[in-house]
Image (spheres, rainbow, N blue to C red):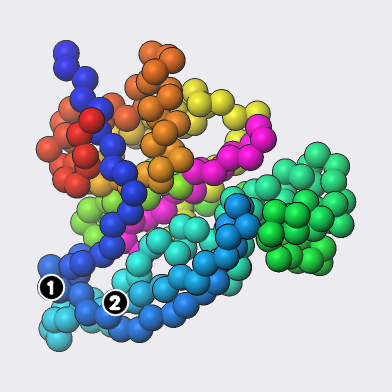
Amino acid sequence: MNETKKYSYGASEVKRCYFCGSKLIPLYKTYRKVYFASGHQIRLAHMIYKCSNENCLKKGFKYKCLSLDKLAPKGIRYSYKILLEIYVLYLQGKTREDIEYILNERGIDINSKTVFNLKNKYNQFISYKYDDLKTSLSKIYQTYKDIKLSFDFSWFSTYAHLIIRDGFVGDVIEFKFFKDFNQKQVADFIDSIFKLNIKISEIRICPELFFICKEIEKYTDIKPFVFPENNESTFKKIVEK
Ligand SMILES: [Zn+2]
């Protein structure tokens, strides 16, 4: 049997209304500054769109560009990667002052009070109880008659997280935290989603995850992105490798 591996690499912006297919028009733009783990600080635009069809069934529905949400949680100026790092440094016994120093050394403007708050925030993310994936996927399908997902992955030391979002409006449906993570664990988890046998039409994965998947294939027998055959035709935008 021929095994086909398909990946979607990077993010794409929403262009058409998911309910009626009409063109989306920009509604407003907001800006946020985000700090990255490298110490870079970037000002990013966050676009909100609406459907151009006056008679659209879902008139008033707001679409957003997912890129910014994928980098940093709402209302927070630091990327998910920095939050993970802070959390792990705490687990390793560093004080908030130590962490402030470590991050400042890398050019990240942060104080010990913010470090403390972000550690708590991250703890909330990982302990939040989401619906089980099957339920979340059914809900997405009921709304859009389709399922698109977006996967984001970060790691630091032996810890990692995988964030799964509904690809339409970017709501987080799973925040999976890995201790002592290895590539197989990540692959197995992703595989378990496909084993639910629910038709998913599109998956976007971040570059970090893409490279992990390439590594997994190189060194093991695990094929994390082998999609069920009957679903193949529905994987529209996915790039064949
Ligand atoms: Zn519409």
At x 14%, y 81%, the residue is 53
Q: Which mark is residue 49?
A: 2
Depth order, front residue of 21/11? 11
Residue behind label 1 places its C-beta within 8 angstroms of ligand 1: yes
Q: Residues within 10 Å of mark 1 (few under 14, many from 20)?
A: some
The chief SS type of the magenta part is: strand
Magenta-highlighted residues: 153-169
Indicate left or right for 106 with 17 as reference. Answer: right
Q: Position of residue 117 (x, y in %)?
A: 75, 64
Determine whether, in the image, residue 74 is placed left or right of residue 127: left
Q: Secondary structure at mark 1?
A: loop
x and y percentages locating residue 133 in the rendered image:
42, 44
Q: Position of residue 56 (x, y in %)?
A: 16, 79
Q: Which residue is mark 1?
A: 22
Is residue 102 positioned above or below 56 on the image? above
Residue type at numbered disc 1: Ser
Task: Give the spatial CA distance, label 2 vs label 1.
Answer: 12 Å
> Is residue 159 on the magenta stretch?
yes
Compared to residue 54, the image places residue 168 above or below, namely above
Foreground residue among 164 and 34: 34
